[in-house]
Amino acid sequence: MGESVAEATITSWLKEVGDTIEADEAVLEIATDKVDSEVPSEVDGVLLEKLFDVDDVVQVGQTIAVIEIDGDDNSASDAPKTEAIKQESVPEPVAVAEVSKAVAVAQETAAPIISSGDRFYSPLVRNIAKKEGVSQGELDAMPGSGKDGRVTKNDILAYLDQRGSQPAPAKVETKETPKVVPTQSNGAEKKTEATPVVASGDDEIIEMTRMGKLIAHHMVESVQTSAHVQSFIEADVTKIWNWRKKVKDEFFKREGENLTFTPIFMEAVAKALRDFPMMNISVQGDNIIKKKHINLGMAAALADGNLIVPVIKDADQLNLVGMTKKVNDLASRARNNELKPDDIQGGTYTVTNVGTFGSIMGTPIINQPQVGILALGAIRKVPAVVETPEGDFIGIRYRMFLSHSYDHRVVNGALGGQFVKAVKDYLEAWDPNREI
């Protein structure tokens, strides 16, 4: 699953109990964030039992099914194991029902729950914590039974049960929350009830896809978490335009890859992040986590209209050829739905190309838990003032807007503006005689 993935949701079973399964044959499909994957069997055998249903969230390392293989010894030894797993799984529906009931009346905490490189919280855990009023401090102090000490759903449910049985903490929660949340929460509920959306007989009702729901949730969460501010700057990319036109055919013959503008822009962003490391950070409570690696997220459009953000790991360590191959590989696998869960994890800064759709600029929403995102506008051929030692004149130039959205909680206007200007300077200083 990848080191940064803690849990997955079962989306469908491809085999039923009693079906014969061959080694490496897909048994079920799972989803982690925006990536769907198949889970193959490691052995030949018969599917004896499914321990989880569709839409259940399973922790990495948990047993999800029992496959019977040839040999009496194996069958005998598997029996007690299966029974033990079943006993652990029986209380699950009850716990989920109790949580669902509690969520309906829960109040949101004032501060959002944020993961860090050292303490990862899955979307499910963060959602439960948010709905149940568990603070960042409580969650950080909570012992985890998952991989590398991560807090699982069962951990936080057990904590909530224990906290609910202690009268003192309950009074503290009741005393604190009315000052912060109920007025806003109740107001939001009233507003929702007062303005219901009613479909007429001629309207078409389309259910959101799983990915669409995830994107909607992440976008709203990001706006509620970060104080979004934008800086815009225009860059002259005439040198890059002419250079690419000159070398792209030779590059394709030699490398078998198309040389697009994206890897060129990614190289400039990686250099700027190296110059301004405080743009390569995350926020956890009152602490700033300065990232050691520069992992660039690259927003890619899918055939169904949704977006996904595969990540170029250690982008500052790649030369232009390596960057081009990585960009093309991730873009191709994104279009063909072949990304792996780890391909979209660990990003520290994101770049999105709004110019692909003709937009000259945009105000993108930050990809949490990052603090910045850069939108690349369309490259346009425009008349512009060109300064030369002999004087100024009007010439035809290729120019584009760079739109930088950043988290004003930790990035002030000076840093946000200096960073995007550094990207512009790297692009405009392009060597037209550069060899590749």
Image: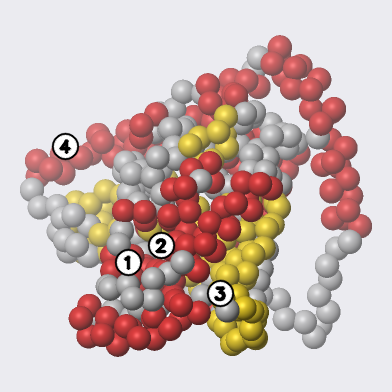
Q: Quadrant of residue 149?
A: top left
Nearest-to-viewer mark from 4 and 1: 1
Sort mark 3 into few (<14), some (14-19) or many (20+) by Cα contacts within 10 Å: few
Residue holding disc 3: 389
The residue at the point 35 percent across, 60 percent down is: 340
The residue nearer to you, when weighing 368 against 16, is 368
Estimate the spatial distance between the alpha carbons at disc 3 and disc 4, rounded to whole Å.
Answer: 85 Å
Nearest-to-viewer mark from 3 and 4: 3
Sort mark 4 into few (<14), some (14-19) or many (20+) by Cα contacts within 10 Å: few
Nearest-to-viewer mark from 2 and 4: 2
Estimate the spatial distance between the alpha carbons at disc 2 and disc 4, rounded to whole Å.
Answer: 55 Å
Can you say whether 370 is above or below 161 in the image?
Answer: below
The residue at the point 73 percent across, 43 percent down is: 104
Residue holding disc 1: 320
Sort mark 1 into few (<14), some (14-19) or many (20+) by Cα contacts within 10 Å: some
Q: Secondary structure at mark 2?
A: helix
The amino acid type found where label 3 is placed reads Pro
Q: Earlier in the sequence, mark 2 or mark 4?
A: 4
Estimate the spatial distance between the alpha carbons at disc 1 and disc 3, rounded to whole Å.
Answer: 32 Å
Marks 1 & 2, CB-CB < 8 Å contact: yes
Q: Secondary structure at mark 4?
A: helix
